Amino acid sequence: MEASDVDFDMVTSSDEWVLVDFWAPWCGPCRMIAPVLEEIAGEREITIAKVNTDVNQISPGRYGVRGIPNLILFHNGEAVDRMTGAMPKPGMDDWLNRHMT
């Protein structure tokens, strides 16, 4: 799902797990992890919210996003952990498993 500065708080305030992907169309590593995130969304009870940092600059600024891709995991409306940079699926699975078990 696409998220914006306007609906960011509503998207991340869910009682469910939400993984926010701060990305930009020109970012090669962002494009590399996109299929991995789609795969994760199909395997887990998690919402993947994509925030284009070229268009939405308030939300990344609030969370101190300085590099992309930047992933922030939310649960019950709170930021639980973050990861910057591209990582292969096994690494992302390990990272998520540390929090979602």
Image (cartoon, rainbow, N blue to C red):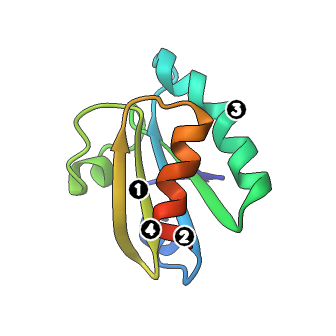
Q: Which residue is mark 1?
A: 5
Are the residues at dot 2 and dot 1 in contact (C-beta closer than 8 Å)? Answer: no
Q: Which quarter of the image is occupied by the C terminus?
A: bottom right
Judging depth in this view, the residue of 53 and 42 nearest the camera is: 42
Q: Nearer the viewer, mark 1 or mark 4?
A: 4
Instruction: Name the side, left or right, on which 11 lies relative to 72.
Output: right
The number of numbered discs placed on residues in the rendered structure image is 4
Q: Secondary structure at mark 1?
A: loop
**Residue 2 picture location, percent across and down:** 61, 49
Q: Which residue is mark 3?
A: 35
Which residue lies at the image location 48% right of the left edge and 21% below the top edge?
29
Q: Residue furthest right?
A: 42
Q: Which residue is mark 2?
A: 100
Q: Nearer the viewer, mark 3 or mark 1?
A: 3
> Which label is found at residue 97?
none
Instruction: Name the side, left or right, on which 84 lies relative to 74.
Output: left
Q: Nearer the viewer, mark 2 or mark 1?
A: 2
Are the residues at dot 3 and dot 2 in contact (C-beta closer than 8 Å)? Answer: no
Marks 3 and 1, the one that precedes in the sequence: 1
Marks 3 and 2, the one that precedes in the sequence: 3
**Residue 58 picture location, percent across and down:** 28, 51
Q: Secondary structure at mark 3?
A: helix
**Residue 90 picture location, percent across and down:** 60, 39
Q: Secondary structure at mark 4?
A: strand
Amino acid type at circle 4 is Phe
Judging depth in this view, the residue of 80 and 51 nearest the camera is: 80
Q: Nearer the viewer, mark 4 or mark 2?
A: 2
Q: Which residue is mark 4?
A: 74
Amino acid type at circle 1 is Asp
Marks 4 and 2, the one that precedes in the sequence: 4
